[in-house]
Amino acid sequence: MTLLGAMLLGMAAPAHAQGKVVPMKYKTDYFISQQLYRNGNQLTNLSLSLEWPEYISGSNALALQNHLCSTLFGNNAASASEGLELFTKSLGQKIDVNPDEEGLQRQYVKLLVHQLGGEKDRYISFCTLYIKRDGNSFLPEERKQTLFTYDIVNDKVLTAKDILSYLAYNLMRGDLMDELAHYNSYFHVYYQFPDQVCLIPQGLVFNILNSGEGEGYDQLAVLPMQNSKKYMKRGVKKMAEKGMVKDVEGLVASKQIVSPANIVDTTMVYDVVDEMPEFSGGMKDIAEFLTRVVKYPEYEELRGVQGRVVVSFIVERDGSVSTPSVISPVSPGLDRESVNAVLSMPKWKPGRHNGVNVRTRMNVPVSFKLKTDK
């Protein structure tokens, strides 16, 4: 298969039509930043790479929010913004310049969340990584990687004990290790039995303990679905076999985006304004820009994964692009590539309301298509 291209479908549009409030069905926020915090003599360099689901199948997914916040931030917040705010407050005051002072105790904290894949309206799986190390050392003093699956239907987080059967842990333990070694050339039988497992459409994903570099993920080993089912609990097997049907009744996002008021607030994000933001050169240039910068991820290209990703983002008052979110996902790889393309956009002509530059939310759909060579 060869790459046909990533093309813009339709046109960049405001997040909602005038006078309409549309419930959000899917939304993944991307927090990618490097920040400094100071608390007395303690200086913290915080690195974030978070693919955070805010809405899944029209739900705020409270159990998932709580689990992610607990795993990464050490609190039981109900959203990424709330959890991150509580976490950063514990680090002290945010500063812009790295101080050159003697006696400062420096530490480095790195938080990552990546979506590994799932089945729409049924489940989605994640890999998280928390790293903390002293600023004078290359070796982490704290390091924890987790894998888990979120059961959308039952609003439940599934870890290894919920996914693997009694047989997998006990009677078939050796068989499982042998099969992992067979299908993953870098996996060796002397590795410990994996304590982190999640489900993706291709099968079960296991982490190989203590195999990652200091600041990277542990390696992941995939066992194909046809070999994985005998190790799964009955409910997980049904989920993998598409045996569950989503009941969406009552699952409507509780947070709505407010329409602009008559008084201009330059800090809020508007959906509809007097003069909408414009990309330099117009719609044709957006299509050409995306076609030029978007690269087909190798994993999706080899497996023939195609689709249309919709990325929502804010055009700031100075025309820069910020806070991208995927509101219509296809796969983690295609979603991630679409976000990267949006973040690489040059400055827009900002939106204006009542004669003032304002922050405006826009949506851009990106289509990934492949063609088969004869």
Image (tube, rainbow, N blue to C red):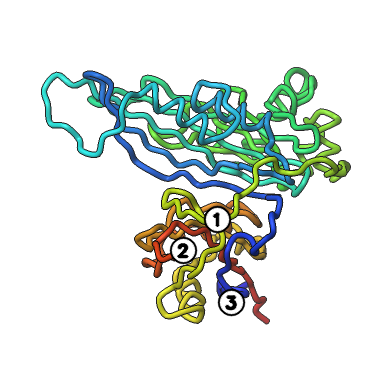
Secondary structure at numbered mark 1: loop
Of callouts 3 and 1, which one flags the residue occurring earlier in the amino acid sequence? 3
Q: Quadrant of residue 118?
A: top right
Residue at 67 percent across and 65 percent down: it is: 307
Which residue corresponds to mark 3?
4
Residue at 62 percent across and 54 percent down: it is: 327
Query: CB of mark 2 within 8 Å of CB of mark 1?
Result: yes
Secondary structure at numbered mark 3: strand
Q: Determine which of the numbered discs, if any, sits on residue 260 in the image.
A: 1
Tag in front: 3 or 2: 2
298 up-or-down from 370: above or below? above
Which residue corresponds to mark 2?
353
Q: CA distance from mark 2 to mark 1?
A: 9 Å
Of callouts 3 and 2, which one flags the residue occurring earlier in the amino acid sequence? 3
152 up-or-down from 44: above or below? below
Quadrant in the picture for the C terminus: bottom right
